[in-house]
Amino acid sequence: MPQQLIDRERIEKREPTGKKIALDVGLTNFYTDSEGQTVDNPRHLRKSEKALKRLNRRLSRTKKRSKNRASSRNRLSRKYLKVSRQRKDFAVKLAFRRSRV
C-alpha cells in the first residue's frame, strides 16, 4: 500500500485568555489541575503487555542472524513504536483539547 507524506504546518491564531492553572502529573492520574479536574492515565504499555510478551518470546526462540529473527525483531519494534505513538497522540490531543477550553 503506497503512502504519501504531506509536509504541512498547521497555523492557528489564538488569543491568550489570561487564565492560569497548575498541573500535577502523577502515576494513577495523567494529571490533576488546580481546578480539580483529573484525567486518567490511559496505560497504553500495560494494555499491550500481552502482545509484547508474546513477540519477545517468539524473538528469543529464533536462531541468531536468521531471516525469521530479523522479521521477529521488526514486529517487536513496530509494536513498541505503536505504543510510543499512542502515548504521544494521547498527550497531543489532550493538550489541544485543554487549550480549547
Image: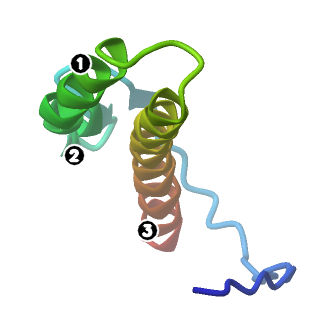
Viewer-nearest of labels 3 and 2?
3
Viewer-nearest of labels 1 and 3?
1
Q: CA distance from mark 1 to mark 2?
A: 41 Å
Amino acid at the residue labelled 1? Arg
Amino acid at the residue labelled 3? Arg
Q: Which mark is residue 37?
A: 2
Asked whether residue 79 appears in the rendered view, the answer is yes
User: Considering only vertical position in the picture, is 32 above or below 4?
Assistant: above
Q: Position of residue 13 (x, y in %)?
A: 78, 83
Work out whether mark 3 precedes mark 2 in sequence or the reverse, and give the earlier one.
2
Residue at which label 3 appears: 97
Q: Nearer the viewer, residue 42 or 28?
A: 42
Q: Nearer the viewer, residue 23 or 77?
A: 77
The quarter in which the C terminus is drawn is bottom left
Q: Which mark is residue 57?
A: 1
Work out whether mark 1 precedes mark 3 in sequence or the reverse, and give the earlier one.
1
- Disc 1, SS: helix
Q: Position of residue 47 (x, y in %)?
A: 15, 38
How crowded pointer 3 is (Cα within 10 Å; few <14, some 14-19, many 20+) is rated as few
